[in-house]
Image (cartoon, grey):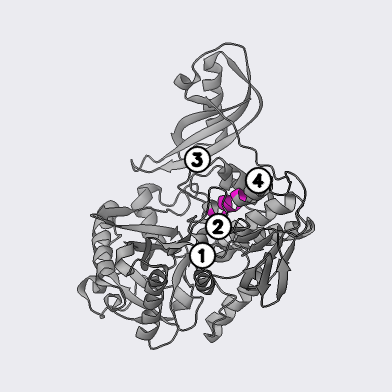
Amino acid sequence: MKILVEQIIVPSTALDEEIFDIARARIKKTRALSISGEIYIYKRSIDARHKPSIKFVCSVCAEVESKGKEIDFSKFGIKLFNEEKVEFSVKGKKPQNPPVVVGFGPCGMFCALGLARAGLNPIVLERGGDVDARVKAIDEFYKTKVLSSQTNIQFGAGGAGTFSDGKLTTGINDPKCAFVLKTLCEFGAPNDIMYNAKPHIGTDLLRNVIKNIASEIERLGGEIHYNTQLISYENGIAVTNNGNFAYSSLILAIGHSARDTYDYLLSRGVAIEPKPFSVGVRVEHLQADINEAMYGESANDPRLGAASYNVSYRERDRGVYSFCMCPGGEVVAAQSEEESIVVNGMSHHSRNGINSNSAIAVQINREDYGNTPKDAIAFQKNLEKKAFALTGKTYRAPVQTLGDFYRGEVKSEPSRILPTYMNGYTELCDLNKVLPSLVSDYLKLGFEKFGKKIKGFNANDAILTGVETRTSAPIRILRTEGYNMLNDKNVYPGGEGAGYAGGIMSAAIDGINIALSILNKGKYD
């Protein structure tokens, strides 16, 4: 059997073997267990609350034998460890037509992989290009300022997460998280994502992981059709710009930026509700300053890596918080529609860039935009168009120092901290003229509060770049407990685009759950 030895607290300089020695000593102390197999670090987090004495807090997993004594292991900081096994197999008769997965982000990818492993030969329809085509299209956009509305940072193999930090943190407590991490490692992700409390892959490594998963789906008999956009569906037929595809099940893993697909679904009368979302800006600091603020004298310890943060503040019915923090990263151009500005963050596995960046976002409630799905989408879109217009109708992003943002003026040129968006392709603007006053006011309040938690966070020369509008989908496509659409038992909305996920991990798990629901229903008996 396997156990977890928890709350092993050691200095950040401790070697793995020292951590294992502490775990072995605790196991021996029980007098009821003996190690019989592998031992490894299951989880490791950084406790930087008491600088300069920074600690690692670890859990160790060990395979053990019981000596037959019944005791309370919890008093030794030990508990049984049971991993959930995820198995994909068809219950009943194989359907005549394959399942069709629309979108190849984390939800669609893991759903298609599960269905392929079950032998159902899924067909994937991805409106954007493959990974290499995406890299080329984004490079061309940066050089020529001509945007592809189909292959960009939002659309294409891997979804929006391909050009991000590849962050794998999640707020959901689902045992399938371990399965997702193991699968990512199987296809090339670094093994440290299995035990780091804040795992990340980095955009450079994540691209190869996506390629490998795509190859495996095809090896198992699945098909992936890039540059193929869903136009409509009816009576088991998905109509695209690249032909028609018969399906047994249609999985809509469309991503949170597929506004044309939202319009189509609304025109069909699909049950969709608006939901709260968030908008704001990207803030950039020097990574060295964040390291020092978080780690003090240990700022240059390579075992700690580039420091990250997570801040939030809530007042009355609204919150302001950091989102998708990218240590040592850059701000990227994430627009998917012409004549608009959208920003996001990205970093490589090494996180060795000069700046850190994070979204600082303000909660938008349903009553703020009119309480309908179309109003929710329009709220985001209007901000993106406004930012584009303010910068002279170019793809320059509006930037402003934090000090000027507080004062509502445009006087301070970035100097110590330089903006990274499109290699500095930015325009000094007053972001107060882009953002609604409720957003500006809460951002200012947030920076004031966060500056008290993290030294230098509210520095006058911190760089703000706008606008961050795609933190999550502004709508939710309603579905049953079996994950299918309310008015169509064969259509399954999932992932971020359907309003059921908030990152790579939760979207992947939603895709897995949809695959399992399709396989285990007995609908093919």
Question: What secondary structure is found at the residue carrying circle 4?
Answer: loop
Q: Quadrant of residue 15?
A: top right
Give coordinates of residue 154: x percent, y percent: 54, 70
Of residues 525 and 131, the one nearer the viewer is 525
Q: Is residue 248 left or right of residue 311?
A: right
Tags 3 and 1 touching, CB below 8 Å: no
* Numbered badge on residue 44: 3
Comes first in the chain, label 4 or label 3: 3
Label count reads 4
Q: Is residue 525 magenta?
A: no
Above or below, comparing residue 516 to residue 504 in the picture? above
Q: What amino acid is found at the position of numbered circle 2 in the picture? A: Met
Q: Which residue is mark 1?
A: 270
First to last magenta residue range: 507-513
* Numbered badge on residue 521: 4
Give coordinates of residue 508: x percent, y percent: 58, 53
Question: What secondary structure is found at the residue carrying circle 2?
Answer: loop
Q: Residues within 10 Å of mark 1 (few under 14, many from 20)?
A: some
